[in-house]
Image (tube, helix red, strand yellow):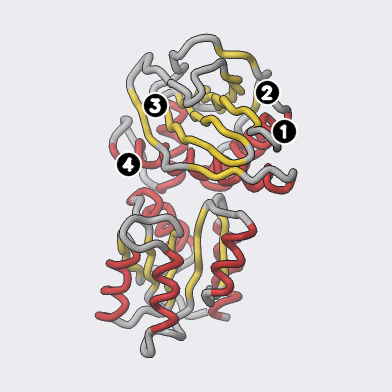
Amino acid sequence: MDKGLKLLIVDDFATMRKVIRNILKQLGYENIVEAEDGSIALRVLKSQKIDLVISDWNMPNMTGLELLKAVRADEELKVTPFLMVTAEALQENVVAAVKAGVSNYIVKPFTAEAMNEKLQKILG
Amino acid sequence: MDVRFINAFLAGTTDVLRMMAFVEPRAGKAFLKKDNAAKGDVSGVIGLTGAARGSLALTFSEPCILKVVSNMLGEEQASINGDVKDAVGELTNMVSGSARKKLESEGLSVTAAIPTVVSGSGHSIRHVLGGPSIIIPFETDDGPFFVDVCLILTNGS
């Protein structure tokens, strides 16, 4: 898998962005950009080439689900791989994310191995 | 309190600490808390509604949370700073999510609010319901932490 891919982490908690960045670094990914919510992420996606979005669900301004829908509705962004990271493991959330076209879904808490497995499924 | 609650929060807490912070917590015997004083230096509190309502608090001793957050971030933490408080909120959110997933499999659908974080020696935890809560004490190699749950089944659940 290409470790030079540019990954976008979207989470309103700075600490959680650091946790995910730390895990991605352990997995060999160094080309990482961050956004604090869905609306900022959308601006980042429109201004630079992003190979994969890793987004939290619950965020102010624009949630992860709203961001996913906006990405899938955008002609230029719609094929961007999208991994949802959330503490919301309830069945209705999974169904909503799948309906909106999520590439895969990882539930907090997770290990670096679990993250690697999801990335391989999406990018491999 | 329903034993399903205790089991879900016990397992959720252990999973979160083990997976996100590589810390192996050892659970002690649960007991009834009679006052509001937290038994630690920083706490995350989250409200819960749905099939059960009430709140959950995670209260950490300073050495314990510094080790947990240092492991989570891959950066040494020397004091209870903004990053540590932020992490306590996120840990509370994750324990709640993990426990709610387990409760859902028992037919109890519970939703959570946004966590808040309180710090300072001897701070108090005031649960939404105001009644007595159950404390599950945990020990780690770097000090204790406590899971403090005050939950009741909603009518019809």
A81 lies left or right of B153: left
**Res A45 seen here:** yes
In the rendering, which numbered label is found on residue B1?
2
**Residue at image x 59%, y 41%?**
B50
**Closer to the eye: label 2 or 3:** 2
Say what secondary structure mark 1 lies in. Answer: helix
Q: Counting other residues with Cα less than 10 Å from the Cα at mark 2, is it few (<14), some (14-19), or many (20 or more)?
A: few
Q: Specify whether disc 4 shares its chain with disc 1.
A: yes
Residue position for label 4: B83
**Closer to the eye: label 3 or 1:** 1
Q: Amino acid at mark 2?
A: Met
Say what secondary structure mark 3 lies in. Answer: strand
Q: Mark 3 to mark 4: distance in Å?
A: 12 Å
Residue position for label 1: B4
The front one of A42 and B111 is: B111
**Res B22 seen here:** no
The subunit carrying tag 1 is B
Q: Amino acid at mark 1?
A: Arg
Q: Amino acid at mark 3?
A: Val
**Closer to the eye: label 2 or 4:** 2
The quarter of the displayed image where residue B26 is located? top right
Q: Mark 2 to mark 4: distance in Å?
A: 34 Å
The subunit carrying tag 3 is B
Q: For the N terminus of chain B, which image quadrant?
A: top right
The quarter of the displayed image where residue B77 is located? top left
Q: Counting other residues with Cα less than 10 Å from the Cα at mark 3, is it few (<14), some (14-19), or many (20 or more)?
A: many
Q: Mark 2 to mark 3: distance in Å?
A: 25 Å
Asked if residue B146 is positioned above or below residue B109 in the image, the reply reads above
